[in-house]
Amino acid sequence: MTEQPLAIIVKGWPRLSETFIAQELVALEEAGLHFDIWSLRHPTDIKTHPLHDQLRARVRYLPEYLRDEPERVAQATNAVEALPGFDAAQHAFAADLARDDTPNRRRRFGQACVLAHEAPSTLRGLYAHFLHTPSSVARYAAILRGVPWSFSAHAKDIWTSPEWELREKLSPTHHGADFGVTCTGFGATHLRSLTSEPERIDLVYHGLDLGRFPAPPLRTLRDVGGPLKLMSVGRLVEKKGFDNLIDALALLPETLNWHWTHIGGGALDAQMRARAAALGVSDRITWRGACDQPEVIEAMRASDLFVLPSRVAKDGDRDGLPNVLMEAASQKLPILSTPVSAIPEFIDNGTHGILSDDAPAALGRAVAAFAADPDLGPRLAEAAFARLRQDFTMPPGIARLQMRLNNLLSTAS
């Protein structure tokens, strides 16, 4: 197999909840970029998306826990001592460890040693998805091998990482990234404020490859007295706000005939089901669990309103600009969401969708108002579809990212 010049580091591969990464990597490969994928974790999802099957790149798995592959780790940690960048990498790791002495930190350095040892001699650069742990591995491995590194930042990695670590990963004097991209203007503004060289940070929306999606269905005007089919896609975690939505659904008028379908798994699955049961709405909810993208699109085409009640979690975690909003728009499915983070970069309230406060009472009022106005949905859906086609398709972002990565590899060579 041909040895590749670029190593792309991901948290896990494949992952159902990260279609935006799969979409990007397939597009980069189709554009002629050659790379290997290095994954910090083995897959846990039973299903995969068709996109994952399209990728031809070799996938290599680092030791998920160092104790699981002691001989591999020992061989790597001994071998990297001979690399020219070992002293600098050891110094950077020690400085980080002094502020974050955790098993996670030690594991990342061990994984970086394995990557630096096992990556081919043709390696000229690294690119990490997410600015927290994958970028830590990329940074240490880049120092060890003496090559540049780069990153794509998203949401949790920006808002829950300590500021000192973000600043150093963006600093030219602390072995920082050669460049970084992020998928929201909200995130880009924040990251640029943390570096003396803000030009290192590019705004690159994920966008959608509309060629992978069917044309939107021909939707008929919904009967006010007919059933209202609501749906959501998202992990059952705090920042998605599904507890507030369940509470909101319980507040809807008894005369409103509604049904909500949820797609996705997550740590709060049992709690959300119990909440729905306690509020007496379980018989109006379908929990479908994890689904692949064709199943998601099929559900969107059969629904009346897409609801994503995002909020800021207690630890600061929050959504960026969830791709599912653009996927809903691609099927002319009206959207109800919240003005959290970068969601307003795609949706102007009252024009492309409805942005509500995340409180249950407000969400309930928004659903009820939508149900009472059958003309509202088509108007919002048409505007969102037009905005998607005009400003949020994938090719411009891929072209920018490809240029940045090619420049990274050229500089290194």
Image: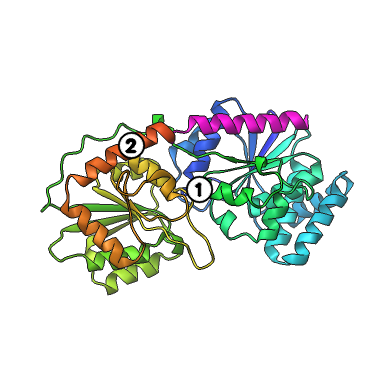
273 left or right of 49 in image: left
Percent coordinates x, y for residue 217 in the rendering? 25, 35
132 left or right of 124 in image: left
Identify the residue under disc 2.
385
Q: Report the residue at 33% width, 57% height from top.
A: 356
Look at the picture and state if 255 lies above or below 29: below
| Residue 402 magenta | yes
Range of residues picked out in magenta: 392-413
158 left or right of 382 in image: right
| Residue 189 magenta | no
Q: Quadrant of residue 165?
A: bottom right
Q: Nearer the viewer, residue 203 or 56?
A: 203
Percent coordinates x, y for residue 8 in the rendering? 64, 40
Look at the picture and state if 371 lies above or below 21: below
Q: Report the residue at 76% width, 63% height from top.
A: 97
Image quarter where the C terminus lies is top right
Q: Report the residue at 16% width, 54% height from top.
A: 372
Percent coordinates x, y for residue 395 in the rendering? 49, 29
**Label disc, if present, on residue 15 of the rendered structure:** 1
Mark 2 touching mark 1, by CB under 8 A? no
Query: Which residue type does callout 2 highlight?
Result: Phe
Gap between marks 2 and 1 measured at Cα: 27 Å
Q: Nearer the viewer, residue 382 or 81?
A: 382
Look at the picture and state if 125 lies above or below 140: above
Look at the picture and state if 20 lies above or below 289: above
